Amino acid sequence: MSQQDNPTSVGAVVVLAAGQGTRMRSRTPKVLHEIGGRSLLGHVLAAAEPLGAAQTVVVVGSGRDAVEEHLTRIAPSALPVVQEEQNGSGHAAAVALDALAEVTGAVLIVNGDAPLLRAETLTRLVAAHGQAGDVLTVLTAEVADPTGLGRIVRDAGGAVLAIVEEKDADEAQRAITEVNAGVYVGDAAAVREALTRVGSGNQQGEQYLTDVLGLLVADGRQVGGHRADDADDTLGCNDQRELAARRRTMNDRVLDDLMRAGVVVVDPLTTWVDVTAEVAAEAVLHPGTQLLGATTVAAGAVVGPDSTLVDCEVGEGASVVRSHCQLAVVGPAATVGPFSYLRPGTQLARGAKVGAYVETKNVQVGEGSKVPHLSYVGDATIGRESNIGAATVFVNYDGVDKHHTTIGDHVRVGSDTMLVAPVTVGDGAYTAAGSVITTDVPPGAMGVARARQRNVAGWVGRRRPGTPAAQAAAAAGGAAADPATDTGKAGSTSRSTATDDEQQGRR
Ligand code: UD1
Ligand code: CA
């Protein structure tokens, strides 16, 4: 299909991503910095995707290994092309077009550091290019502060004449507030030819892609400038402050879309939602909520305050309060928190509960089952309607391997139980509080695994005489030791030490 048949299509997309990004002051290549759940490069590729170009080329250079590795993960069909030395955006474009020798028709060339570009903006630019019949059309924006950007120079009639970089601009040109967005659609052959004529006689000693426009104008060719509807789309990211500003803008856009669709966002300033997350209407996001990666939140669910969900699924009517969760599934009407940590592989069925100060990992908690307080639950299957008492630990690690614990339906695990895996507690079974369970508990049995209690009568009166405890004991009629039952001899060092140890070991 030729460009005339479909004015919104391009033959190829070229992303310029070889620059060093010096101003970021970071070892991470600039285009790999992340905002809103994607790299800068990932955002640009996502915006260009709907153009349906047959080929996508990404010019890599600085940090090329990392950028190429990233590309194989996020856009395996994109072709990385190496620009060995970063001699400027014009040189980068020439390297890309060399790799695209057979492409004819329109090519989109875009800076890799413009994460707020949206597909609609690119589609409109390509359509404007096709309709005007330009040989080259540049995306422009009106901005309040054009500092650092290339200025769009137009003649009295409004025709675009040139792009002048700030460092090369005179005072009158610097006053121009229409700037180059770093996004261009042009005829591949014409741009390729003009690039051969671009010099580096400028302040930065680089080959500017922007010079192509002036060269084509001098040739008498028709070029155009298409103003973006939303100037935010065109903003690049050159340092950490700009990165933070773009992140904020992207988040505002995501939250606006969610609120328009019926999501309750209590405090947009402290709520962060990645572009990759999904939230249904009538979900409620409280202050301090972060929904990251592939997280989904269903209708009527309540998240926050102060909760971070990474790649999680939260079902209808569920709630997650002041908790951190990663790769976890919180089923419909299930509840989490406050103050819990759900690690990968946690799956809470409908109506299950993980309460306060609980850590879970690789565990299925069945319908209506509860882990209410202060527990570690790792590598386990818990049936339905079971209760795990406070301070229970699933002892899953023997120092070398991890082992599984199976808890049946309607089980009551007593408080402070150690379940030493591999171990199974059958349906309807109980464990006694404070037990160390090392062998299976059959269905319906009570597993007891703890020392039997012994009271050393009169111990306080003998060993802590005169203390408030001794006085309270005496007032309560707590008699002195009965020599017949107290085998310990007060003052006998070895015996009393044993007794102290016993006292320490009990609860
Ligand atoms: C560029 C434009 C400027 C525009 C601005 C918009 C030029 C000369 N200037 O300026 O008019 O207003 O973008 O944000 O293009 N790159 C390479 N190889 C190189 C040099 C750069 O691949 O040798 C890539 C960079 O990775 C980046 C893009 O080209 O994605 C632009 O380079 P950058 O240095 O960011 O240009 P700006 O100074 O921002
Ligand atoms: Ca830039």
Image (cartoon, rainbow, N blue to C red):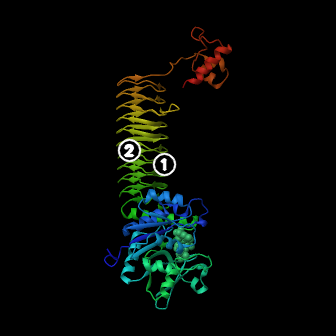
Q: Is residue 296 above or below residue 257?
A: above
Please give the residue where the numbered disc 1 appears in the rendered image: 322
Please give the residue where the numbered disc 2 appears in the rendered image: 334
Find out if the beta carbon at label 1 lies less than 8 Å from the nearest ligand 2 atom: no
Q: Is residue 445 above or below residue 260?
A: above
Left or right, residue 41 beside residue 410 = right
Between residue 117 and residue 351, name the one nearer to us.
117
Residue 18 point in image, percent of width and height: 54, 66
Q: In which quadrant of the rendered view does residue 425 lie? A: top left
Q: Earlier in the sequence, mark 1 or mark 2?
A: 1
Between residue 498 and residue 364, name the one nearer to us.
364
Residue 493 point in image, percent of width and height: 68, 15
The amino acid on which the numbered mark 2 sits, given as a three-letter code, is Ala
Cα gap from disc 1 to disc 2, whole angstroms: 15 Å
Residue 14 point in image, percent of width and height: 45, 70
Quadrant in which ligand 1 is drawn: bottom right
- Residue ID at (54%, 78%): 150
Q: Secondary structure at mark 1?
A: loop
At label 2, counting other C-alpha atoms closer than 10 Å, the crowd grade (few under 14, some 14-19, many 20 or more) is many
- Residue ID at (39%, 35%): 381
Residue 273 visible, this angle: no
Residue 473 got which mark?
Answer: none
Between residue 234 and residue 430, name the one nearer to us.
234
Residue 246 visible, this angle: yes
- Residue ID at (43%, 63%): 78
Left or right, residue 160 beside residue 298 = right
